[in-house]
Image (cartoon, helix red, strand yellow):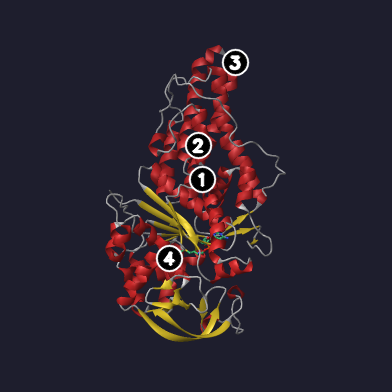
Amino acid sequence: MSKRFYITTAIDYVNGQPHLGHGYEKVVTDVIARTRRSLGEDAFFLTGLDEHGQKVQQAAQKENRTPQAYCDELAADYRAFATTLNLTIDDFVRTTEPRHKAVVQAILAKLHSAGYFYKAEYRGFYSPKEETFLTEKDRRPDGTFDPSYGEVVELVERNYYFKLKDQQQWLLDYIEAHPDFIQPEYRRNEVLGFLKNNTLEDLCITRPAARLKWGIPLPFDPAYVTWVWFDALVNYITIPAAHGDPVVLEALPDLRAKFETQNSNLELWPADSHVIGKDILKFHAVYWPIMLKAMGLPLPRQLLVHGWWQKDGAKISKSTGNVVEPLKVIGEWGVDAFRYYVVRELDIGPDGNWTDAGFAARYQAELANGLGNLVNRSLSMLKRYRQGIVPKRSDELAPNAAASFTAAVENLKASRLQSALGDIWTLVTRANQYVDQTAPFKLAKDPAQSARLDEVLYNLVETCRVLAVLLWPYIPQTSERIFTQLGLASKPDHLADAAWGRLAAGHSIGDPAPLFPRKDLAAKPA
Ligand code: ME8
């Protein structure tokens, strides 16, 4: 067996329903996972839920539920969300599962006996909302703390700390030596700047169980639970361990008896890509590598850091009601319209802005009038003028298809999803222009132009087939519908099939049907 392309999303806090940011991150990750599979690689896609910690305990309390009952109910919603988004996930991790607890405790035990932790008293400020200790450095010039920390309290408590003092230099050297480790470049520079200008403080990795019960107990001191971030980051290792990954089990041999199997050990670690939002970069670029090195495990190959969505130019916020509800949008416009819009609108890196009018405009112009119209009129004309029988091969648009394919694959391999979509759309636009230039409806009226009409029709339906293959990672349901309408029994899930000329003369297509029904432009997504 060989190593799989292993890609993960952040695991979402279970303190509310899935929102646009969650949906965006998962779609981006799914497009990359599907691309890898379509390129012929084995990929493994992990997502899941971050269920411990104060935020979740408080959210449960508010509803008078036990944290576990609260999490179980929401976990069902998040799993359903993954299905609705048409994600090709291979596992779904919940940090309250026994398999995850076992891995967290094995890691804590290993690092504890290796002398990475010490116990000390902390006196100072604490933000319960962010579960973070604050120092004088965190004060603003007027002496207050940023409102994002919520109410800040003074605290005296004993906890376990992870020594970070000796870890700073190697991490800095590693990031300098591996330019692809943190993408995009400006996020990498942010981390380098932080490491160059600050001395890492030792990391508090516990909370007293007397104050916070909802966490994983320390295996060597049950009076404490594990800090939620130490717990959460480990999820990326839990799943390889649970699938018998030899690299992980070698580093954590105590888990062998629990997870090693005779013949189904997957090779996953190191992860090829952790897809995360910009706000959790420090946890992934500083603490996670240090934890991994201490465990004796290689670092992930890449952190792919996306920006944040706003709505109508303002922060998305439940309390102000400025939200986008992905499930409502999908219910009204279809899952592929949602998948398409988020990737087309927002490149991986900068922040983005959702507007209902922008969504409706892209739907109408690009999906309904662009792709949908091309496929519908191409197939309808083949039905009408040639009884749906594919004429002999013609290569007029072959160079356009090849150019889009080459450019898109290069961008896809580098996870430049927005650019690759642009490359594919060049072909959509070219083919629509080709219909206007060749005017097949006029050719059809002149029997002397019959051979020319055959050529035009071949170029159009073959372009539709190529587009279905190229677009499958993004809008899989639509691609599969195009294949069905073309009368093809196979799936459009192999990028190699985007090579020109696979549609055979004499093949009989199925029935065309609109892919993206036109909507009244005044209609808005919910
Ligand atoms: O941070 N736009 O969970 P989370 C884009 N449990 N992305 C957004 C966003 C927005 N408006 N809001 C949130 C956590 N995200 C931790 C992660 S990983 C070991 C633990 C992104 O539910 C956010 O950046 O607050 C993060 O990547 C993901 O959604 C989950 O956020």
The image shows residue 384 at horizontal and vertical percentages of 57, 19
Query: Disc 1 marks which amino acid?
Result: Asn
Query: Disc 4 marks which amino acid?
Result: Leu
> Which structural element holds mark 3?
loop
Closest to the observer: 407 or 327?
A: 327
The image shows residue 264 at horizontal and vertical percentages of 31, 50
Q: CA distance from mark 4 to mark 3?
A: 66 Å
Query: Disc 2 marks which amino acid?
Result: Ser
Q: Which residue position is annotated with label 4?
A: 233
Callout 1: 10 Å neighbours few (<14), some, many (20+)? some
- Kindly identify the residue that appears in the image at 46 percent across and 69 percent down: 229
| Disc number lying in front (3 or 2) | 2
Q: Which mark is residue 479?
A: 2
Image quadrant in which you'd find residue 246: bottom left
Q: Is residue 248 above or below residue 42?
A: below
| Disc number lying in front (3 or 1) | 1
| Disc number lying in front (4 or 3) | 4
Residue 82 shows up from this direction: yes
The image shows residue 517 at horizontal and vertical percentages of 63, 36
| Disc number lying in front (2 or 4) | 4
| Disc number lying in front (1 or 2) | 1
Q: Which residue position is annotated with label 3?
A: 445
Name which of mark 2 and mark 4 comes first in the sequence.
Answer: 4
Label 4 CB less than 8 angstroms from ligand 1: yes
Callout 2: 10 Å neighbours few (<14), some, many (20+)? many
- Kindly identify the residue that appears in the image at 43 percent across and 56 percent down: 8
Q: CA distance from mark 1 to mark 2?
A: 13 Å
> Which structural element holds mark 2?
helix
